Image: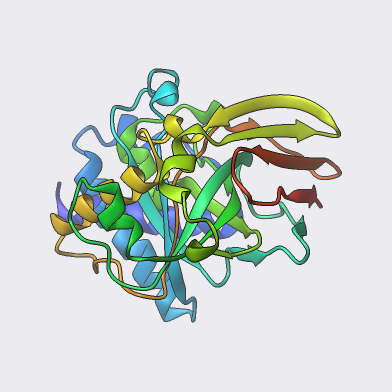
Amino acid sequence: MAESTLKKVSEELIELAASGHTAPQFSERFPKLDAEAGYRAMRRLHQHRLTIGWKPLGRKIGFTNRTLWARYGVDKPMWGFVYDHTLIRAEDNRAEVPLAGLAQPRIEPEICFGLKAPPPRSHDAHAILAAIEWVAHSVEIVQCFHPDWKVKLPDCTAANGLHGRLILGTQVAVEQIPDLEALLPAARVVLRKGGKAVDEGVGANVLDSPLYALGHLVELLAIQPDFDNLHAGEIVSTGTLTDAHPVKAGETWTTAFEGLPLPGLTVKFA
């Protein structure tokens, strides 16, 4: 993809990310925009944010839930950065989240890891788990800069993995859940809006386990020389266990887990 075109996409991305506006699909207007070119545009957005003082705290992985691939027209996961400006730590597992500036926000319940070491390139869940210090429940608010959430994978990689906000719940040391590796695939989350159940999902929806989702990110970063590999201290949210649902100011959403000793979250939108 021509650098001049890539510059145009990235400059528009910077404006959209700052304003919460929408625009026609990049992938329709620029047919040569593939997933990797999208990451190059995202890299420019990332550099802009670093320049204005944002600090990266970790990563989010998207489209790890294979049950959603056909609906969103994608065929593989992707990732984006989580920043100090986008992370909200839920005190007592409750948080108020302003939606101003987000484009068509949707809610996603997830499992998040805190790293104590760089995870290995491995398909062994036990080996991946050894690099994790803590596990937490997280809720990601994703956004879409294109009308009606009509996207292709390049639109998503360009837009920092569609990341808007990440609400982080109580961090539980891995040592406190000795059978975590076995519990994660079967763990079930229920998502409620105003007390009414809206959706539910299990850990196995996320590439068979959130641990395998983390492993996938490690493999992906290994072939992306423009980006740093994961390192100790980063947080990684591993993808939605349910579908993504639209949210509006004034609503309160809650989550609850079965089969995993993690507290749910209460999120009020403003």
Name the quadrant containing residue 95. bottom right
Query: Where is residue 157 shown, x and y percent of the image?
Result: 34, 46
Q: Nearer the viewer, residue 203 or 258?
A: 258
Instruction: Name the foreground residue: 102 vs 111.
Output: 111
| Left or right side of 226 for 25 | right
Residue 216 on image: x %, y %: 26, 46
Q: Is residue 182 left or right of residue 224?
A: right
Relative horizontal placement of residue 126, taking residue 32 as reference (left or right): right
Q: Is residue 21 visible?
A: no
How does the figure colour the protein chain or chains? Answer: rainbow
Q: Estimate the x, y position of residue 187 in percent, counting from the top left.
A: 55, 36
The residue sitting at the top extreme is: 70
Q: Quadrant of residue 94?
A: bottom right
Return the residue nearer the eye: 36 or 171. 171
Which residue is depicted at the point 38% across and 59% down? 11
Count the labels in the image: 0
- Decide: is 24 above or below 16: above
The image quarter in which residue 254 lies: top right
Residue 180, position as x, y percentages in the image:
47, 50
At x 43%, y 41%, the residue is 182
Q: Considering only vertical position in the picture, is 164 above or below 143?
A: below
User: 103 left or right of 132?
Assistant: right
Can residue 27 be seen from the camera position used here? yes
Q: Is residue 214 above or below residue 153?
A: below
Q: Residue at 47%, 42% (x, y): give it.
A: 184
